[in-house]
Image: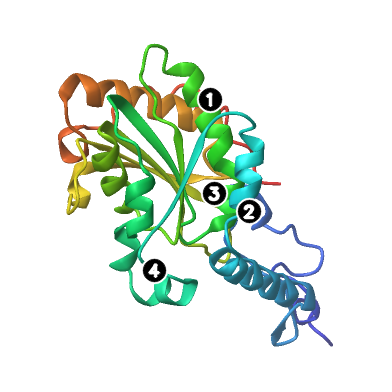
Amino acid sequence: MIDKKLLSTGSAPLGKRDDWQDLRQFTRARIGLKRSGNAQCTKDVLAFQESHSKARDAVHIPLDVAHLQAEMEDVPVICVSSQAQDRQTYLRRPDLGRRLNAASLEALPHGQWDVVFVAADGLSSIATQKEALPLYRVMCKRLVGWRIAPLVVATQSRVALGDEIAQKMGAKIVVMMIGERPGLSVADSMGVYLTYAPYVGCPDSSRNCLSNIHSYGLSTSAAADKLTWLMQEAMRLKETGIGLKDSSPENGIIENTPKIS
């Protein structure tokens, strides 16, 4: 007699409830995948290949700077680039992605700014393309009375490139909105790095970070809540990083985060 359990085409025997289903709503990780004999189901294999392709595209597709400029309409945008001349160099030489090229240095104006926002491609141009401008617009509305520098769009950029941008422009704070390294569950996640009194060679311990800003992670509204609080505290304490502990209210973080379907 054939055991019905051996006829299972999924993670649960025939006629039995799939206990993994309740857990899948909390993560985009691949858990409890179904199988067909000793192999994974075709749809799961194809989904994996699709996610891998999206992750590669996120790294290699150039940031559409012209589109970002068009979206800003008449608001001035300054475009800069690092010393990495192309994407292959950028990936192989992280150090070049941390410094501006000569033309970009000359293009940056100096002023008495409280903050400069930088939209940088990082390792996921797709994330920056989707998430940077919505967050920037929300923050401009919330930072009443702040002297906000023109938006800077940076290509072939690492996080530390924002330090040189802010130092050259005379900004007290830099907010680096940058595409995070893509994974097989999320390829369009943006991170935000906040640094007070940045300078070339500034250590990572001087920064505060908000990560996982994307459709299934931290929403624009929730990210803006946290970032506004951190920026206000940074100005009060005159420091960021290990000297600024994130004790901001968590109200609205869960409510404003989309559920996984």
Reading the image, the residue beneath label 3 is 128
First of labels 2, 4 by sequence position: 2
Confirm or deny contact between disc 1 and disc 4 (CB under 8 A).
no
Is 244 situated above or below 261? above
State the SS at label 4: loop
Mark 3 or mark 4: which is in front? Answer: 4
State the SS at label 2: helix
Q: Quadrant of residue 247?
A: top left
Confirm or deny contact between disc 2 and disc 4 (CB under 8 A).
no
Confirm or deny contact between disc 2 and disc 3 (CB under 8 A).
no
Residue 52 numbered mark, or none:
none
Residue drawn at x 30%, y 20% is: 232
- Marks 3 and 4, how far apart at CA: 19 Å
The answer, for residue 254, to whether it is visible in the render is: no
Reading the image, the residue beneath label 4 is 84
First of labels 3, 4 by sequence position: 4
First of labels 2, 1 by sequence position: 2
- Marks 3 and 1, how far apart at CA: 15 Å
Is 140 situated above or below 86? above
Mark 1 or mark 4: which is in front? Answer: 4
Mark 4 residue type: Ala
Q: Position of residue 198 (x, y in %)?
A: 21, 41
- Marks 2 and 3, how far apart at CA: 27 Å
Residue 138 numbered mark, or none:
1
First of labels 1, 4 by sequence position: 4
Nearer-the-camera pick, 148 or 230: 148
State the SS at label 1: helix
Mark 2 or mark 1: which is in front? Answer: 1
